[in-house]
Amino acid sequence: MAHEVETMAYAGELPWHGLGTEVSNELTPIQMMQKAGVDWEVEQQKIVTETGIEINDKVALVRTSDNTLLDVTGKDWKPVQNEEAFTFFSEFVAAGDMEMHTAGSLREGRNVWALAKVKESFDVFGEDRVDSYLLFSNPHQYGKAVDVRFTPIRVVCHNTLTFSLEAASKNYVKVGHRTAFDADTVKETLGLASEKFAKYKEMAQFLGSRKVTAESLIQYYNDVFPTTSRKEEKTPVVVYDDMSKAAKMCYDALEVQPGAEFAAGTWWQAFNSVTYYTDHLQGRNSENRLHNQWFGYNQAKKVTAAEKAVAYATAA
């Protein structure tokens, strides 16, 4: 497979994945778009066979800068241009509520994203700081919707966290490409960052107030990363040797992960061992992990991990 990251720019400190070109942290959203190399448009073009026959119900999505074919879609597919995606942040940046953080394209331009740091953060359990971000994913690919979401990131380990399943439904907006993108409607639906992250802080403090047991910890990891042979079994896994490889790696990371000293022995520590594994240990390389933590399998996996942690903590 080609490299996941095609182009990328970042402001401030080098991100955990070590990718991208450093730029000023005072850029406007449009300037960040230009520095990130995504200041191109998507055009819908006719598809004509070698014999000259036009395919009436399909169009090609083509990047105008170099005529790269991104995908084939139906004629009712409405592309959201990259400039629209970056302009979405302009009001927030101008008001001083956010600053551009990273931006770029993945998978040969099929997924363009921009990440802005919200001027809010909170501490839990002493100096365990969680920063707030707003992520805009603009896919130029059939079957993928525009995705705008609030994303918490734990500073001590750079883990991209997530909301529990109940809260997750309220921290993002998805817009399909058969509907016109309306920035004002999306902003209204998203609501205030302060309200979203206040809820997340409540969840973090709750998880940090409930102690794990050796048996519940093993069951938790197995729930998140079940072994293939035991998916249909009703008998819970209660010994380390019966756990899947991924579950074992989470268990082994519990007390050695960055920030393990915060709320040690609690469900906050257990949940973060999962996010540490998905963001820093799983995957072929940094590019692969970057894609999966925001847009791929691991983004959904962390929602499951948060939901299960809350359930186990409630029962503790």
Image: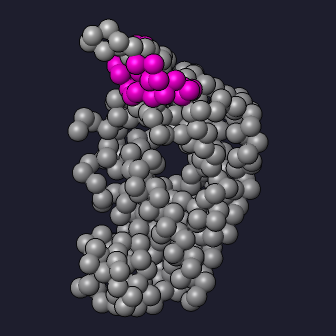
Residue 18, picture quadrant: top left
Q: Which residues are magenta?
A: 55-79
Q: Nearer the viewer, residue 239 or 263?
A: 239
Q: Nearer the viewer, residue 109 or 206?
A: 109
Percent position (x, y) of residue 286? 31, 47
Where's the N terminus, which quadrant? top left
Q: Tell me what residue is drawn at x 41 percent, y 68 percent.
A: 274
Q: Tell me what residue is drawn at x 52 percent, y 54 percent.
A: 153
Apparent side of residue 94 relative to residue 177 in the rendered image (left or right)? right
Q: Is residue 105 magenta?
A: no
Percent position (x, y) of residue 104? 44, 31
Residue 237 position (above or below residue 44): below
Q: From this viewpoint, is residue 205 visible? A: yes
Residue 80 position (above or below residue 268): above
Q: Tell me what residue is drawn at x 60 percent, y 47 percent.
A: 149
Residue 13, picture quadrant: top left
Residue 58 position (above or below residue 153): above
Q: From this viewpoint, is residue 123 visible? A: no
Q: Tell me what residue is drawn at x 26 percent, y 78 percent.
A: 229
Query: Which secondary structure type mostly characterizes the magenta part of the structure?
Result: strand
Percent position (x, y) of residue 267? 51, 78
Report how many numbered discs are placed on residues in the image. Answer: 0
Q: Nearer the viewer, residue 143 or 188?
A: 143
Q: Nearer the viewer, residue 263 or 177?
A: 177
Apparent side of residue 77 relative to residue 158 in the rendered image (left or right)? right
Work out which residue is located at the far top of the displayed protein and give it.
52
Where's the C terminus, which quadrant? bottom right
